[in-house]
Image: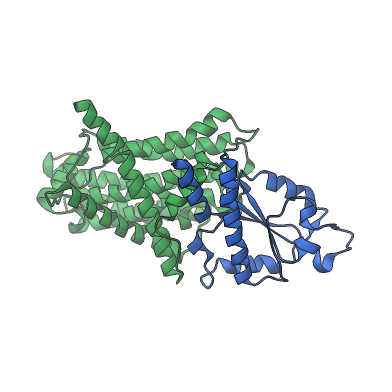
Chain colours: A blue, B green
Amino acid sequence: MFKKMIDDCTVKSPWIYHINSGSCNGCDIELVAVLTPRYDAERFGFKLVGTPRHADIIVVSGPVTSQSRDRLIRTIEQVPDPKVVVSLGSCPRSCNVFKGSYSVEGPLDKFVKVDVPVAGCAPKPEAVIDGLALAAKILEEKRRNMAK
Amino acid sequence: MQILWFLFYILIFPGFLFTTFAGLLLAGIDRKVLARMQRRIGPPITQPFYDFVKLMGKETIVPDAASRTAFLTAPVIGFVSLIVTAVVIPIGNFLAFRGIADVIVIIYLLTIPAVAIIIGGASSGSPFSGIGISREMVAIVSYELPLILVLLTVCKKAGMMLSGGMTFSLSDIVVYQFYNGTMVSHWAMIPAAIAFLMIIPGEVGTQPFDIAEAETEICEGTMAEYSGAPLALFELSHAVKMFVMTALFTSLFISGWTTGSIVLDTIIVLAICILVTIISMTLPHASAARLKVEWLFRYYWKIVSALALVSLILVWCGL
């Protein structure tokens, strides 16, 4: 009985933690725009938290630079299960215009498993909300499989 | 039979079940009204309940640097002491436990949740928690002085009429208001009531006064290493503290009336609690940014303490 209740509540209260692994700040602003009164993602229960220990969804923006690689992997490992990784923008998918730079190590899925990629440079807030809603569904699925 | 009634008081009606429900309701209404003030749609009123249940289902991580026992028992201590406080506070005319000095008990019990946060933060072994607990200590020192001044004022006001001295019994305060009208209808008590309204957000730790859990500066401060069930208990304590403080305000300043039915009394008390929550916590949250540590200290010791002191002097002069 409790298991089903927890599964149902997981999809309604996904908390977001945002990591910038060398982004140009464009996608970061779009993510914040999602939480403003105009788009208001809080009506689905999304909440931006300040520490990886509280997070359910990890949003990574920017290509993975050599400075941020180890810290990124360590931060994502600190998030308690179940967790979902969302890549925000084109940079974590393909390195975008930074491809071939001496300080860029490569796309995000080389280092961690990405569940939901949101494309765009920068993605529209509607696309970000869509991606986050999909991530919340995957989160519920992971929670269901975890408890088995 | 007596023991069964005590168990009922502690576990169901003014105790665990009712307080949890009322606290989560107040927290949900706070978030919804805040969203409406910012012209957002906002989360559903049941959102704190979803958050709580979800956190219960998450993995609990205990860091290597933490001392395990203190890290895991601190949230339980804080939550239990809040439940005990809620049992002592009268709802309308109904009082589960009568005591001679329950105001003093409440002063001590209200400090324990903050101390539990300090214990939990200190045992989690993170530098962010270290900064958080030092800020939490400053917050305790700030709001304790005006809180005690306000409680002294109310006790003196009720005690002068009943025995000539002071009374530290909440049931006496309710009886006094039953015969002489509510406390806020005496003009000398109005500064104390305003001071108490200003203390509530500091005690609960909502937005402009949440220096210990500043998520943008120090990564949630004292809560930085908590995850899963202990974090859920801390969130629940935060919600229950909202109800305990607003119910305490209700019984100190706006009680003494009764409709005869305990269910109706409870509903009216809940309605007053919601109103007090919106005035004292949601309005400052929507209109002000987080204070600096020294500003918080100055605010409580200068403005709020001065208001409480004015009331205390007026009451001492017999007004």
User: Nearest the camera: B122 or B15?
Assistant: B15
Instruction: Indicate the quadrant where residue A103 lies.
Output: bottom right
Residue depicted at x 34% and y 57%: B277
Residue depicted at x 57% and y 48%: A54
- Quadrant of the snapshot with the N terminus of chain B: top left
From this viewpoint, which residue is outermost toward the left?
B179
Residue B268 seen by the camera: yes
Residue B224 seen by the camera: no
User: Nearest the camera: B59 or A78?
Assistant: B59
Is A55 positioned to the left or the right of A88 in the image?
Answer: left
Is B54 positioned to the left or the right of B279 in the image?
Answer: right
Image height of B99 relative to A123, above or below: above
Instruction: Indicate the quadrant where residue B193 lies.
Output: bottom left
Image height of B118 relative to A37, above or below: above
Is B31 positioned to the left or the right of A101 in the image?
Answer: left
Tally of marks: 0
Residue A93 in picture, x, y percent from top left: 77, 62
Residue B58 in picture, x, y percent from top left: 55, 43
Image height of A125 relative to A102, above or below: below
Is B163 positioned to the left or the right of B225 in the image?
Answer: left
Residue A51 in picture, x, y percent from top left: 61, 49
Residue B218 in picture, x, y percent from top left: 60, 50
User: Nearest the camera: B138 or B118?
Assistant: B118
User: Nearest the camera: B146 or A70?
Assistant: A70
Residue depicted at x 58% and y 67%: A34
